[in-house]
Amino acid sequence: MSLMWTVKVVGLGAVALSLSLEALAWLHRRLRPGKILNEVLFFPSETACVQHIFTPPSPYSCFCSLPHGVETSFSRLLSYLMSASSSLDLCVFAFSNMDLCRAVVALHHRGVNVRVLTDKDYSAITGSQIGVLRKAGICVRSDINSVYMHHKFAVVDGRLLITGSLNWTLTAVQSNMENVIITEEPDLVRPFIQEFRRLWMQNDPTQYHDSSEQKAARVMGESNN
Amino acid sequence: MSLMWTVKVVGLGAVALSLSLEALAWLHRRLRPGKILNEVLFFPSETACVQHIFTPPSPYSCFCSLPHGVETSFSRLLSYLMSASSSLDLCVFAFSNMDLCRAVVALHHRGVNVRVLTDKDYSAITGSQIGVLRKAGICVRSDINSVYMHHKFAVVDGRLLITGSLNWTLTAVQSNMENVIITEEPDLVRPFIQEFRRLWMQNDPTQYHDSSEQKAARVMGESNN
């Protein structure tokens, strides 16, 4: 009889143990619902056709002379950008890359809420696409409070951060050594959302009061690349 | 008697449950030894004395006219840099900031293995600290394979990544809108370690063979800030 009870006690203990293990594993899965996206893209990017990103699904529908069906750093960057479904907050120093401009305009036409903050001086340089964005009806603000608004980041749908050394130019994409981080890590995304909100409000054109000190501070002497 | 055994069984089950919970919590702590460091610094930074970072522990040992005992984006950046104990791999486009130069030289003198990769053109501009690093005996290589070596990242002890839009200049720190990410996230740190290794080998001066095409590609026309 005593042996039988011992067996029962051990059995019940084992059942309790396995049940609690199951419960904890379930809890663990619930608290961490999957791996957080963290990716790094390096440039210069190989050159390849990106037409299929704008007109999916076929990667072979374009007949240009560039390689087709090749995934590159640039095509991945474009794809992450085009994944926006509700909002795109873009804060970029130099913006002359026509494919990136096409992506931003396409998102705007798709109904995505696009806001662009750029550097006052560089929005007027030759090849800048800022005018194209404005003409498309996208809300663009220029930073007037610093020597350079030197950020190069985008926040997609308030959840995905795209940031790095890469200006949105053709040379940066095709010729320079550059990096772009793609991350959903909340501790990294959150500060950029807050900073965008701060800069966006700070550069509201209805609130402009560019003091002479600020103007004087806009020196061009030192390298800021 | 039956009731007594039931009590014992339930009691033992509870003990087994709590023990297994403890064991799992311990295992969880072992597998995730703490929150991974993720921080974002924004610039321009407030100006404050950073002397205490070079000569700790007192923040009040310097008598300069700058504010003392104030933590700023720049002081945090310097502190993370100075936390290096074994290695610093630095890949930076423009390097003219004297405090950052002082930090890198101090690390070198402390025995930290410092490697610096920089842009060929920008290492020769007025105010560049690259010459100071070379004179201090730090191993510096210049990128000759791209139009611009435009990275601005550092890897501390092969574990901490410092990267962003910020060039290592005074204007970038004090006058521009800039960002720097500080992260220990392995999925972000690892690619930068690999990229540094690749670029370091690619720019080994014993292997230089700068072709005329590469020279021709070094156009200066487009903005690459």
Image (tube, coloured by chain):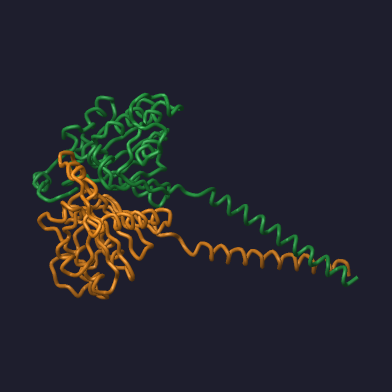
Chain colours: A green, B orange
Q: Residue furthest right?
A: A1
Q: Tell me the quarter of the image containing the N terminus of chain B.
A: bottom right
Q: Position of residue A139 (x, y in %)?
A: 28, 31
Which quadrant would residue A78 be assigned to in this image?
Answer: top left
Say whether residue B32 is visible: yes
- Compared to residue B218, the image places residue A16 above or below, namely below
Q: Nearer the viewer, residue A11 or A215?
A: A11
In this view, B93 is above or below A80:
below
Q: How many marks?
A: 0
Residue placed at 54% from the left, 66% from the top?
Answer: B30
Q: Which residue is located at x 36 percent, y 57 percent? A: B193
Q: Which corner quadrant holds the C terminus of chain B?
A: top left
- Specify the quadrant of the image occupied by residue B115: bottom left
- For the residue pair B202 and A214, the one nearer the viewer reads as B202
Q: Give the x, y percent position of residue A184.
A: 43, 46
Quarter of the image holding residue B223? top left
Seen from the viewer's position, the closer of residues B112 and A68 is A68
On the question of residue A197 being in view, the answer is no
**Residue B123, percent from left and from top:** 16, 56
Q: Position of residue B8 (x, y in %)?
A: 80, 69
Tell me: B64 left or right of A108: left
Vertical position of residue A6 compared to residue B123: above or below:
below
Q: Is residue A190 above or below residue A168?
A: below
Residue at horizontal 34 percent and vertical 31 percent from the top:
A66
